[in-house]
Image (cartoon, coloured by chain):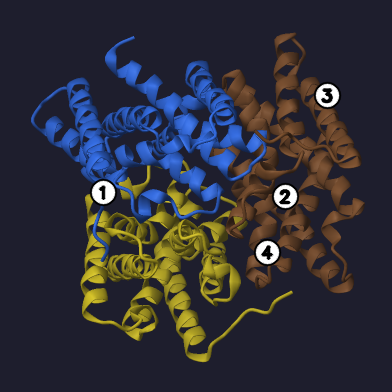
Chain colours: A brown, B yellow, C blue
Amino acid sequence: MDAFEFMNVVGLVAFAMVGSLKAADADLDLFGVTVLGILTALGGGTMRDVLVGRTPASLQSVGEMSVAFVGVGLAVVLTRAIPDRLRDHPSVLLPDAVGLAAFAATGALVGSQAGLSPYGVVILATLTAVGGGSLADLLLTRVPVVLREDFYATPALFGGVVFWLLLRLDVTGDTAALVCAGLVFSVRVLALRYDWELPRV
Amino acid sequence: MDAFEFMNVVGLVAFAMVGSLKAADADLDLFGVTVLGILTALGGGTMRDVLVGRTPASLQSVGEMSVAFVGVGLAVVLTRAIPDRLRDHPSVLLPDAVGLAAFAATGALVGSQAGLSPYGVVILATLTAVGGGSLADLLLTRVPVVLREDFYATPALFGGVVFWLLLRLDVTGDTAALVCAGLVFSVRVLALRYDWELPRV
Amino acid sequence: MDAFEFMNVVGLVAFAMVGSLKAADADLDLFGVTVLGILTALGGGTMRDVLVGRTPASLQSVGEMSVAFVGVGLAVVLTRAIPDRLRDHPSVLLPDAVGLAAFAATGALVGSQAGLSPYGVVILATLTAVGGGSLADLLLTRVPVVLREDFYATPALFGGVVFWLLLRLDVTGDTAALVCAGLVFSVRVLALRYDWELPRV
């Protein structure tokens, strides 16, 4: 497993935890908690694959889904053991930032391989990173938090732009993906540390 | 028309009725009532086809859509004739369980034909069965009822697991689909009869 | 640029403006305002392309997305300059009707080229025209306005039916698309002028 695959695994577990914790807070039953965990972890990548005409990796590989189930299981165990709001704790927020970074980079890579326009590459990076969580928000009938107030989609979008610029400078896709992931992670952590917000119009 | 096709037709009518009745309760106009009926009947199968890269059968065949329109028409007529809440009546709930069974079996069959992983087969069975109703709930800005409290997705999921096990035992797809449908229907009827619920976490 | 392409550009700008204004009213941040504008303009066409198995034009061409950004920019500037509710003003409603017409015609054309059933053609016309705005409504957790009370989807649906009838009479696709667009625009303007509504059931 290389660094990038490792980030992906960390991200899948963290995203599944976040989704399941959100569902448990909303008093869903066990099926709902599982669906929201799986969807948060794999929904972004599934939308990405559908948009470029691939059969979703989430439905074809056993590995990704199994890793996401670990996150769901962790959430179920921890939500019973720890009464506090786990979702805002660094032990969840940091792995979640790792996932944001890994997913944005994967999305940008898939988009450029599919021959999308620069816009398309940036959109696919962002959607892969924040699409799963936004679907989960929608299923809970909430305006996706990334649209309202969080500096969460912005690092992913920024990473997509940088990825595309690097490709134009003849950097290989793999290197561009690593730089992109590093940038997304750094910007996200800075945003958490300093409570960055986007302006309203 | 064999037994399986018959179940599909019953299911399309029942699902369309349920969707349209829900929309009428929510005071949508005639267009909204029609859309929610059609979407409840055909939305799950459409998502299934998109996920495995097929052009949706709902947009290609005339038959399925016509059958769904019968359900919409029945809902419009009955909702005017009968003031009571029709959706909880056995004359709707039983055909609805037939649809759940037929759609779960079709979803599992399509998933295995598309070469999905065991997870993928189970997800496609469940999504085909409950996806349309959940889309309708979303359009009414409600948390899909299957995520909250209903023992409705669980029979479909269980049917998908059994379907996959049977294929592993070299049972043909057609036989496995019939057994799957029979199981889903039985479990759903038992759940209705005994008010089964999933635990919360 | 022919008449049809011109209508498409007008529509993209108008739809993006409507989506962004809606998002600004709902107090989303700059990212949310941008996403809702882009989604309103390009969401219907993207769903259309996914349903017929194409890579979405919105992710491949630079032009459409750039035009939509113009609409987002206009909305951001105007919402600061003009305090009144811009969305109900004829200077927005008329270009929006142009877009409805152009998108319905494009949807019908793509549907017939993909060999869909008559139902499929009509659904694709309607979805291309109203799908983006409905997605935006969903992201704001609102029941899509077209399902509740607006005489907005009906002209598009009607245009899809007429398009299909014309093809059956051996009219070419291009001519049928122009007639369809003209009809949709006229019916929509009449509906606005006379406050048409669909009955409830």
Q: Nearer the viewer, mark 2 or mark 4?
A: 4
Quarter of image, res B121: bottom right
- Give the x, y percent position of residue C74: 53, 23
In the picture of the structure, the residue carrying the numbered disc 4 is A34
Evaluate whether label 3 is on the same chain as label 1: no
Of callouts 3 and 2, the N-terminal one:
2
Disc 3 target residue: A179
Amino acid, disc 1:
Ser
**Residue for badge 2:** A63
Q: How many marks?
A: 4
Query: Badge 4 local density, few (<14 within 10 Å), some, or many (20+)?
Result: many
Residue C133 location, quadrant: top left
CA–CA distance in space, label 3 to label 4:
33 Å
Q: Nearer the viewer, residue A10 or A101?
A: A101
Residues at marks 2 and 4 touching, judged by CB atoms closer than 8 Å: no
Drawn side of residue C86 relative to residue A70, left or right? left
Q: Assign a secondary structure to mark 3.
A: helix
Give amino acid for label 2: Gly
Answer whether residue A54 is visible to the viewer in this image. Answer: no
SS under mark 1:
loop
